[in-house]
Each structure stands twice: as C-alpha cells, then as structure tokens.
Amino acid sequence: METLFSSTLLFNANLAQNDYVGFTFFIGYMAMFAASVFFFFERGQVDGKWKTSLLISGLITMIAAVHYFYMRDVWLESGTSPTQFRYIDWVLTVPLMCVEFYLILKAFGAKIGLLWKMIGYSMLMLVAGYLGETAFRSNSVLWGIISTLGYVGILYEVWLGSARKLASNSNDPHLQKAFSALAWFVLVGWAIYPIGYMAIETDGWLRNVISVRNMDLIYNIGDAVNKIGFGLVIYGLAVNSTAASRK
Ligand SMILES: *C/C=C(C)/C=C/C=C(C)/C=C/C1=C(C)CCCC1(C)C
C-alpha cells in the first residue's frame, strides 16, 4: 500500500479541486458513454430504415468516449492539450456526421458524391487545423483560414447547396425539421471550435481574451453539444417518423 500511494503516477493522476477543464474531460467521457448506450438500445424501437442512422449516432459518441478516456489521462498527467487524440477522434467522427446527413437524405435522392464531397471538406478542415495546432503553430492563422475553407464548404452544402435542396424538395415535414436542426448545429455548434483554436498563444486572434488552457474547455463543450445533440436530433426524427408510419 505504502508504495502504491507514493507512486508518482497516482499523485499526478489526481484531479485537482479547481481543475475545471479536467472536470469537463470526465463529464465528457461519461456523457458520451451514456449517450452511446442510449442510442444502441433505442435502435430496437424504431423502424428498420432508421436503424443504421441510430447505429451511427451511437458509434459517434462511442468513438468519442474512447478518446476521452485517453484524453483525460493526458490532461491529468501533463496539463497539456491532448491534440493528437483530439484530432484522431474528429477525423473519425466528423465524416460519420456527414454520413448521417447522407443517410437521412438518401430516400430523397442524395447521391454518394454528396457524401464524398462533404467528407473531402471535413478532411481539409481537420488536416489544416491539426497542422496549425502542431507543426506550423507559429502560422496558426494561415492554417486556420485554410481550415475554415473546408468548414465553409460544409456550410455551403448544408445551407445552400445540394443537401439543402434535397431536404427542401422532400415532402416530409419530420425530415425537414430535423435537417434544419442539424444545419443549425453545423452553423452554431461547430463555430465553437474555431473560437477555441483562436486561443493559440503565438498568434491566435483571441489569445489575449481566452487563455490557451481554456481551448480544451471550449473543445470539450463543443464535442458534448455537437455529438450528443446531433445524435438526439436523429433519434427524434427516427421516433417521429416511426410513430407516423405506425398510425
Ligand atoms: C465531434 C467533433 C466535431 C463536430 C468537430 C468539429 C470541428 C470543427 C468544426 C473544427 C473547425 C476548425 C476551424 C473551422 C478552423 C480552425 C481549426 C479547426 C479545426 C478548429
């Protein structure tokens, strides 16, 4: 026992009383975990055509839960941003969110090309963001702008481009409501991330307003809102549409 308690690992792995960023890593982990269980179980309650969508919702939160499990440790042991785990998570979950758009629009004529286009924009956004946070941190503004081009591409598809047109032309009010909610998540919920990025201490535009420590706080809040919120919108659509078809 003596040796166990004096081990540096245990001391370093202690969550300090005032480590609010650390709290959000733990809350984020548990919330993502619980959301996954919820989506996987609720999958049984909806019509067959919705089951893949709910599965993807659960996979998104599950992939995030596993990464949060590791990110908590990095934060506790080093007090620094777990940037690599963060971006590995995003590179898997953001494309899956594009898949969610594709799946709900498929019945109304979405082509696979729309999915690839959105995944391409996501990759540009995330690879440029990663380079700006790591290898080219002293040029983070430039890489942030390149990344934003990818983000704008996704916004265009969802607000003005073919995805929006397919949703508007569908004759399904449940789909239109859900699509519009998801589009707001992309516009407002996803805009949380560039705000966190601007806390980079070398040249971030908000570096004097937000300390770089709070970058993780902002990313953690963004993840919980967007991943669980996105999944709940899909869940609501599946439940409403199932109820309507069973009337
Ligand atoms: C579940 C994870 C999600 C929805 C992550 C979304 C991430 C973004 C929308 C990140 C966007 C960025 C910019 C638009 C510019 C600065 C760099 C990024 C990568 C933070």
Image: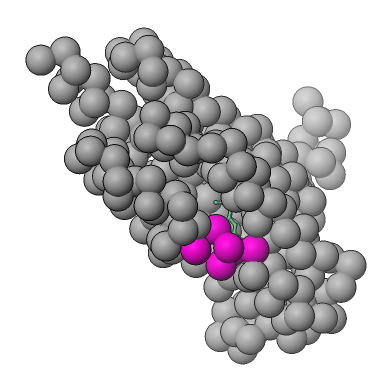
Q: Nearer the viewer, residue 6 or 130?
A: 130
Identify the image's colour scheme: rainbow, by chain, secondary structure or one colour: one colour
Q: What is the residue that sits farthest to the left in this orientation? A: 247
Relative to 112, 229 lies left or right = left
Front residue of 28 and 104: 104
Whereabouts is ligand 1, in terms of quadrant? bottom right
Residue sticking out furthest to the right: 135
Taking the spot 59% from the left edge, 36% from the top edge, the residue there is 112
The region drawn magenta spans 150-156
Please give left or right for residue 185 compared with residue 199 in the image. left
In the image, residue 50 lies at what x, y percent?
A: 38, 21
Residue 90 seen in render: no
Is 205 above or below relative to 137?
below
Across and down, in percent, residue 109 comes to 43, 35
* In this view, 75 is above or below 36: below
Main SS type for the magenta part? Answer: helix
The front one of 52 and 235 is: 52
Q: Could you tell whether 168 is left or right of 84 in the image?
A: left
Q: Residue at x 77, y 58 (%)?
A: 127
Residue positioned 60% across, 84% down in the render: 206
Q: Quadrant of residue 4?
A: top right
Number of numbered discs present? 0
- The x and y percentages for residue 46 are 31, 16
Q: Nearer the viewer, residue 163 or 124?
A: 163
Identify the residue at image location x=19%, y=17%: 245
Report if residue 205 is visible in the image: yes
Rendered-image quadrant of the C terminus: top left
